[in-house]
Image (tube, helix red, strand yellow):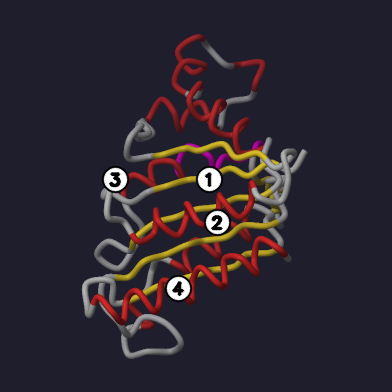
């Protein structure tokens, strides 16, 4: 049963370009047949707790040495990782805030990037342990010039960061579908969104 984990990270619960495109992706995914399922994780509507010193200590404590306090501190991480590892594909939708990912998404990332669970290290090499082999990143940029080698491409610490991160965790195929200048001309934005939805349909069908 093909299973998609969708992560939404726009602080705009309505009027969000990234959420709108995420809806288009999810609809196309489920239209492939009744076996195609989606689990949604909205890190804005249900904020993820930031990791603490105790959480980090739990990450690096062997299982047979975990105390009740450490188990409690890492329980959310355990649950989010289990959710992640059940997915065949990932969908992450987000706007770029101040040249990077929203802090709400970073909180989720810090809970799921965990040695021995989503990556391993043997003293010389890192190896990704995430089971999903494909991820789609849907990004919205308020200004233009970030994509296709534009003048602000070097200031994009959003798409490239997520691509690196997901690859580090073992995801083999990562596609970014992006729309920029979302605060610009409405007609131009509508045309860009239409093009992005076409890319989404092709990506889901692939």
**Nearer-N-terminus badge (3/2):** 3
Q: Nearer the viewer, mark 4 or mark 2?
A: 4
**Nearer-N-terminus badge (1/2):** 1
Q: Nearer the viewer, mark 3 or mark 1?
A: 3
Dot 2: within a 10 Å radius of its alpha carbon, few (fewer than 14), some, or many (20 or more) residues?
many
**Nearer-N-terminus badge (4/3):** 3
Read off the residue under disc 2. Answer: 25
The secondary structure type at the circle numbered 4 is: helix
In the rendering, which numbered label is found on residue 194? 4
Q: Is residue 161 above or below residue 150?
A: above
Q: Nearer the viewer, mark 4 or mark 1?
A: 4
Read off the residue under disc 1. Answer: 6
Dot 1: within a 10 Å radius of its alpha carbon, few (fewer than 14), some, or many (20 or more) residues?
many
Q: CA distance from mark 4 to mark 1?
A: 21 Å
In the rendering, which numbered label is found on residue 85? none
Q: Is residue 112 magenta?
A: yes
Q: CA distance from mark 3 to mark 1?
A: 15 Å
**Nearer-N-terminus badge (3/1):** 1
Circles 4 and 1: CB atoms closer than 8 Å: no
Residue at 35% across, 61% down: 17
Quadrant the C terminus occupies: bottom right
Residue extent of the magenta highlight: 110-117
In the rendering, which numbered label is found on residue 13? 3
Circles 4 and 3: CB atoms closer than 8 Å: no
Q: Is residue 145 above or below residue 8?
A: below
The secondary structure type at the circle numbered 2 is: helix
From the viewer's perspective, tell me whether residue 46 is left or right of residue 196: left
Residue at 68% across, 35% down: 86
């Amino acid at each position: 049963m093909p299973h998609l984990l969708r992560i939404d990270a726009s602080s705009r619960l309505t009027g969000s370009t990234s959420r709108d495109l995420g809806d288009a992706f999810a609809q196309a995914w489920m239209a492939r047949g009744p076996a195609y399922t989606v689990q949604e994780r909205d890190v804005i509507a249900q904020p993820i707790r930031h990791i603490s010193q105790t959480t980090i200590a739990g990450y690096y404590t062997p299982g047979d040495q975990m105390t009740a306090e450490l188990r409690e501190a890492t329980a959310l991480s355990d649950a989010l990782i289990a959710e992640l590892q059940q997915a065949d594909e990932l969908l992450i939708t987000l706007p770029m805030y101040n040249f990077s990912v929203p802090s709400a998404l970073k909180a989720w990332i810090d809970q799921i990037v965990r040695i021995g669970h989503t990556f391993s290290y043997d003293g010389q090499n890192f190896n990704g342990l995430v089971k999903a082999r494909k991820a789609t990143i849907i990004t919205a940029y308020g200004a233009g010039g970030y994509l296709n080698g534009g003048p602000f491409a070097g200031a994009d610490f959003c798409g490239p960061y997520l691509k690196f991160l997901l690859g580090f965790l073992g995801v083999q195929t990562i596609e970014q579908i992006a729309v920029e200048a979302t605060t610009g001309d409405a007609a131009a934005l509508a045309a860009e969104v239409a093009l992005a939805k076409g890319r989404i349909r092709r990506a889901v069908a692939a």
